[in-house]
Amino acid sequence: MSLNLSTLPSKEIMPGYHGKLVHSETMSIAFWTVTKNAEVPEHSHVNEQIMHVMEGEFEFTLDGVTKIYRPGDIVVISAHQKHSGKAITDCKLMDVFSPAREEYK
């Protein structure tokens, strides 16, 4: 399979979080465009997750510890680890999940 990010459709998964999503058998990757002040409430999931901030500033809370992340920052989130986030500015984020996020398909 070969894809180009510019031609992938975007889905609004939650208010202010627009994702271009790619899935394989065992993983998912999401390229997010996030609107300033958009929030994702605290949650956890069975998927391991790696978040990469590509543009903007993103406030992220992992296990009760809140930090501001900027371009180039990467956060590794273990399965079942509680986390939440808020876009301080308009942001572009990339998330990788394993196993695949079935609910995003």
Image: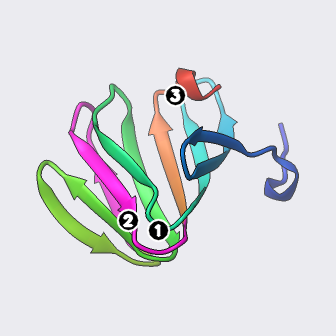
Q: x and y percent of residue 104 in the render?
A: 59, 29
Q: Residue at x 81, y 44 (%)?
A: 9
Residue 95 in the image, given as x and y percentages of width and height: 50, 50
Left or right for 9, reference 38? right
The magenta stretch is 73-91
Instruction: Tell me the quarter of the picture where residue 11 sits.
Output: top right
Q: CA distance from mark 2 to mark 1?
A: 7 Å
* SS assignment at label 2: strand
Provide the secondary structure element on which disc 1 rests: strand
Quarter of the image where one finds residue 88: bottom left
Q: Which residue is mark 3?
A: 101
Q: CA distance from mark 2 to mark 3?
A: 19 Å
Distance CA(mark 3)–CA(mark 1): 19 Å
Kindly check if marks 2 and 1 are in contact, taking CB atoms under 8 A apart as contact: yes
Does residue 21 sit above or below 76 in this rendering? above
**Amino acid type for the residue under numbered disc 3:** Arg
Q: Which mark is residue 74?
A: 2
- Which quadrant holds the N terminus? top right
Residue 75, magenta (yes or no):
yes
Is residue 39 or residue 4 the one in the foreground? 39
